[in-house]
Amino acid sequence: MNRPGLATACVAMLRRDLTLAWRRRGDIAMPVLYALIVTMLFPFALGPEDTLLQRIAGGVVLVTVLLAMLLALDAMFSSDIEDGSLEQLVLAPQPLALMLGMKILAHWLTTALPLIVIAPLLAAMLHLPGAVIPVLLLALLLATPLLSLLGAVLVALTAGTRRSGMLLALMLLPLCVPAMIFAAGAVAAAQQGLPWLAPIAWLGAAVVLAVVLAPLACAAALRIALDA
Amino acid sequence: MTAAHTAVPLLEARGLSFLRQDEPVFAPLDFHLHAGELALVEGDNGSGKTTLLRILAGLLYVGEGELRWRGEPLQRATCVGEILFLGHQLGLKADLSPRENLQIAAGLFGCRDGVSVAMVLDQIGLRGYEDEPVRRLSAGQKKRAALARLLLLPATLWLLDEPYANLDRIGIALVNQLLETHTAAGGAALVTSHGAVSFHGGEPRHIRMHA
């Protein structure tokens, strides 16, 4: 009898979720298309005025990415609860928080990363100056994991309730305010030629905290959800 | 059956019951299970058979009474990986093939010495369906894919909730044979079932549930 090491189990978990996402790759495209269309609506609604669009570009891209991530969030644990995979995961000899951490990582890779990849396109559609785009990408790279981690805790807490999608949005959006303020602050500072490192550093600190705590909270919440 | 009557039972329940909204789901249970023994959990629909198995697996918390594992109070840390639970929900991902599902299980739980995923799939009767997505398999084949975990993963105690459901006559014989091999090798199993269980490895213990 040979027990798999932590690394083996983590790789197995990550590969499982990435394979599943690949088998349903149409679902990955949805948030991306949603973000594209929402961004496209702004010039139509506000008029193709360069200065106005430039001023709101950073904020619009950040909010659009946040809303697009919400679309895919509530599916994070639901299929695992329905088909009993979560029970098996809870009973596995591996630490549940670590395995859930891998699930969150897979979720971030399949939903947030494609959005970050198209973010320069979204920014260009709103005439954001090219020099600011690297700062926007850095802000997104730190803000999106924060949203995935916070979102995962709330998904775990609302697991098993009916119509959890709406409830999830109502609970998550207020929690996103600090991340939004720091990310938008960094982009705005860069746009005005001011130092932008401080808000980015705050985002980084928040991500580190969330990486440590969120999987533990998820594990506790899902154990309670299974107990019900 | 040599290991059947060693002094300390593998699993022991004393006055075990489970409360749902302060109402006991089943009357207090006392039973013990030695290595090499099979126990049949019997009772009407709603008498708490599945609840009992979920408690033993560690998915539900013990309401009242006590559970002991090898003589010590049962704790997750001491029995983790030694108990294999197969519930109503099979724990298979519908978009993955039986082979991929088993590889994940092996990645989390480990596998027995000298056993491979391909061998297990062959033995459980899924040859030719190894790479078919589980969603395209019949109910009985899905059940077989889930049962393949019993052959692949190392565990001492099997908790099987209705393992015969959806299986054909050959499948039922296969489960009986799996149980015999497992108990003969010093393992133990708790099985809930309405169907006829023909077990040739000695008289199974009966646990009667009353609501």
Image (tube, rainbow, N blue to C red):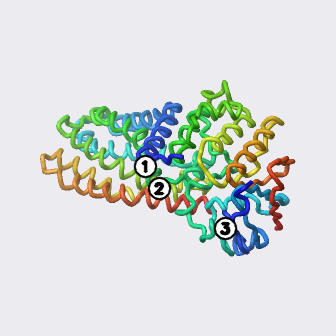
Q: Which residue is mark 3?
A: B8
Specify the subunit that label 3 lies on.
B
CB-based contact (under 8 Å), mark 3 and mark 1:
no
Q: Residue at x 18, y 44 (%)?
A: A191
For discs 2 and 1, the disc positioned in front in the rendered view = 1
Residue B31 in the image: above or below residue A91: below
Q: Which residue is mark 2?
A: A95
Discs 3 and 2 lie in a common subunit: no
Residue A6, numbered circle? 1
Q: Residue at x 72, y 71 (%)?
A: B17
User: Helix, strand, or loop for circle 3?
Assistant: loop
Given residues A134 and B67, the one toward you in this image is B67
CB-based contact (under 8 Å), mark 2 and mark 1:
yes
For discs 3 and 2, the disc positioned in front in the rendered view = 3
Extreme top residue here?
B128
What's under tag 3, amino acid-wise?
Answer: Val
Q: Position of residue A210 (x, y in %)?
A: 36, 57
What's under tag 2, amino acid-wise?
Answer: Pro
Q: Position of residue A188 (x, y in %)?
A: 21, 48
User: Helix, strand, or loop for circle 2?
Assistant: loop
Given residues A228 and B54, the one toward you in this image is B54
**With B147 as the anchor, is A27 left or right in this view?**
left
Residue B188, numbered circle? none
Q: Residue at x 83, y 47 (%)?
A: B200
**With A147 as the anchor, is B75 left or right in this view?**
right
Q: Residue at x 84, y 48 (%)?
A: B197
Q: Mark 2 Cα within 10 Å, few/some/many (few <14, many 20+)? A: some
Whole-number angstrom distance, CA of label 3 to CA of label 2: 29 Å
Given residues A198 and A21, the one toward you in this image is A21
| Label 2 or label 1, whichever comes before in sequence order | 1
